[in-house]
Image (cartoon, rainbow, N blue to C red):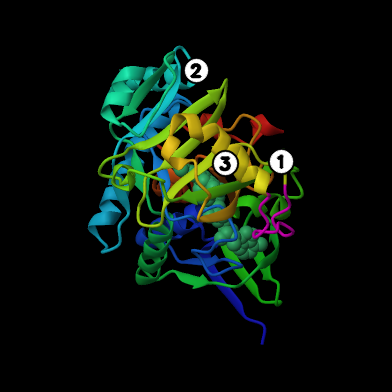
């Protein structure tokens, strides 16, 4: 049977941003139908691995901080409405050579937006957390609002609440084609069903290029590997009550990040060290031994207790723009098609505010947040 249905808004992709988007649309009374080709939260895209870093004093640019302020509010609001853990504040420590752009960026955001930070010498760091061993010429900046958000819990909660507000969600349903004529949008599923909507929101993560062949965005889909470790010693010092998230700039502009043990080991990764992949062909089980070796070689002088074989790994994907900003904009040709790609390896923490922005853009074409850095035009 070929189903034909109609809604105010159709949403493709129900991961971090799609689930937040359907939640915001449904909560605000819109009729919404959402589609995901897998069963979210799943491990095929960009939103798995139990914990994501959230931080406020943002090294990537102070323009992100107002968005983050709202995201924090919304994460806590969500946490108050569910039994699942959504957010935990534990602090976030960036360690780099004194004067590094990463440290100066955090200090700048803190100054502009009055975020609470502490500046620490190498010795301060060693005496506060004896598991860390920074070089003498390194400095640390501790973001007191740093913490973790829990992606699978967030996505599950968004999707459950969306359904309670009346959203219709279709899992294991791949959208193979969309057509817009400016008045309405038609979606075709892989199995031949047709859906109509007044508007369409595309948040298909690493698969965005497949659905936007007409505008040929310069996106780089990067394979990103995560490893989990059990420390040789001092296991209790790696628990979230004793350790912040910590990122180490080991070479100019190159970073590793580590999260404490939230119950499944200590998660560590090299940020932006992957090669370009096709998400439909990516082997998510294949990890080269040298990849773990490289991470361990960097980690062992800074965190000697983690110089041990990993207990687990996972493959994920970053959807990068050339300037590492996001995409939040209408399709250049179709003003009833909104495109959301807040990733570039740092987008999860924004997902609650992205859903809110999506609702406002789709409802009245405006957002109270400055989203000028996220246009499609800058990429064309
Ligand atoms: C390893 C790793 C670590 C990260 N760490 C952090 C961090 O610490 N802090 C942080 O803020 N951010 C982090 N990020 C970035 C963040 O996780 C991403 O920005 C965010 O998850 C992207 O969400 P998304 O909704 O765009 O993509 P996804 O969550 O992958 O959702 C896209 C969805 O679209 C669906 N889809 C695609 N095509 C179709 C189609 N044709 N039909 C139907 N459905 C379709 C997919 O099945 C998928 O569910 C990290 C990312 C990775 C990979």
Q: Secondary structure at mark 2?
A: helix
**Which residue appears farthest toward the bottom when viewing the image?**
1
State the residue at coordinates (23%, 56%): 80
Q: Counting residues from the N terminus, which is met first, the one under dot 1 or under dot 2?
A: 2
In the image, residue 282 lies in the stretch drawn in magenta: yes
Q: Secondary structure at mark 1?
A: loop
Which is more toward the observer, 61 or 124? 124
* Nearer mark to the viewer, of 3 and 2: 2
In the image, residue 211 lies in the stretch drawn in magenta: no
Q: Is residue 222 left or right of residue 118?
A: right
Q: Is residue 214 visible?
A: yes
Q: Which percent across, then down, holds residue 211? A: 70, 55
Q: Is residue 313 above or below residue 100?
A: below
Instruction: Please give the residue where the numbered disc 1 appears in the rendered image.
Output: 217
Which is more toward the observer, 341 or 106? 106
> Which numbered disc covers residue 101?
2
- Are the two marked residues, 3 and 2, in contact with CB atoms closer than 8 angstroms? no
Q: Is residue 37 left or right of residue 98?
A: right
| Mark 3 close to ligand 1, CB under 8 Å | no
Which is more toward the observer, 372 or 243? 243
Quadrant of the rendering where the C terminus is positioned: top right
Q: Which percent across, then down, holds residue 83? A: 26, 64
Q: Is residue 196 above or below residue 80?
A: below
* Nearer mark to the viewer, of 1 and 3: 1
Segment tinted magenta in the rendering: 277-288
Instruction: Please give the residue where the numbered disc 3 appears in the rendered image.
Output: 329
Q: Which percent across, then down, holds residue 153? A: 38, 60
């Amino acid at each position: 049977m070929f189903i034909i249905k109609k809604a105010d808004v159709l949403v493709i992709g129900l991961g971090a941003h799609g689930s937040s988007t359907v939640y915001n649309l449904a909560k605000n009374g819109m009729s919404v139908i959402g589609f995901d080709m897998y069963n979210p939260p799943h491990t095929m895209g960009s939103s798995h691995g139990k914990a994501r870093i959230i931080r406020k004093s943002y090294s990537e640019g102070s323009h992100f901080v107002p968005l983050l302020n709202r995201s924090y509010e919304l994460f806590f609001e969500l946490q108050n409405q569910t039994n699942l853990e959504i957010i935990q504040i534990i602090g976030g420590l960036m360690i780099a050579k004194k004067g590094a752009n990463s440290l100066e960026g955090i200090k700048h955001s803190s100054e502009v937006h009055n975020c609470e930070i502490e500046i620490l010498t190498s010795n301060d760091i060693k005496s506060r957390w004896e598991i860390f061993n920074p070089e003498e010429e390194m400095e640390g900046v501790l973001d007191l609002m740093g913490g973790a958000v829990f992606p699978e819990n967030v996505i599950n909660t968004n999707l459950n609440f969306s359904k309670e507000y009346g959203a219709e969600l279709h899992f294991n349903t791949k959208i193979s084609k969309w057509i817009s004529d400016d008045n309405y949008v038609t979606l075709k599923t892989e199995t031949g069903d047709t859906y109509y909507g007044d508007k369409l929101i595309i948040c298909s993560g690493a698969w965005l290029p497949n659905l936007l062949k007409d505008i040929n965005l310069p996106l780089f889909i990067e394979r990103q590997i995560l490893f989990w470790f059990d420390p040789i010693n001092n296991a209790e010092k790696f628990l979230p009550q004793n350790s912040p998230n910590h990122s180490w700039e080991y070479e100019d502009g190159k970073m590793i990040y580590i999260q404490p043990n939230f119950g499944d080991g200590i998660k560590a990764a090299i940020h932006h060290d992957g090669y370009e992949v096709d998400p439909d062909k990516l082997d998510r089980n294949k990890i080269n031994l040298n990849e773990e070796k490289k991470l361990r070689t960097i980690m062992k002088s800074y965190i000697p207790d983690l110089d041990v074989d990993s207990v687990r790994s996972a493959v994920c994907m970053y959807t990068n723009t050339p300037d590492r900003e996001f995409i939040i904009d209408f399709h250049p040709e179709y003003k009833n098609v909104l495109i959301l790609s807040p990733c570039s390896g740092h987008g999860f923490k924004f997902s609650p505010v992205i859903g809110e922005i999506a609702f406002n853009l789709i409802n009245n074409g405006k957002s109270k947040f400055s989203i000028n850095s996220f246009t499609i035009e800058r990429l064309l």
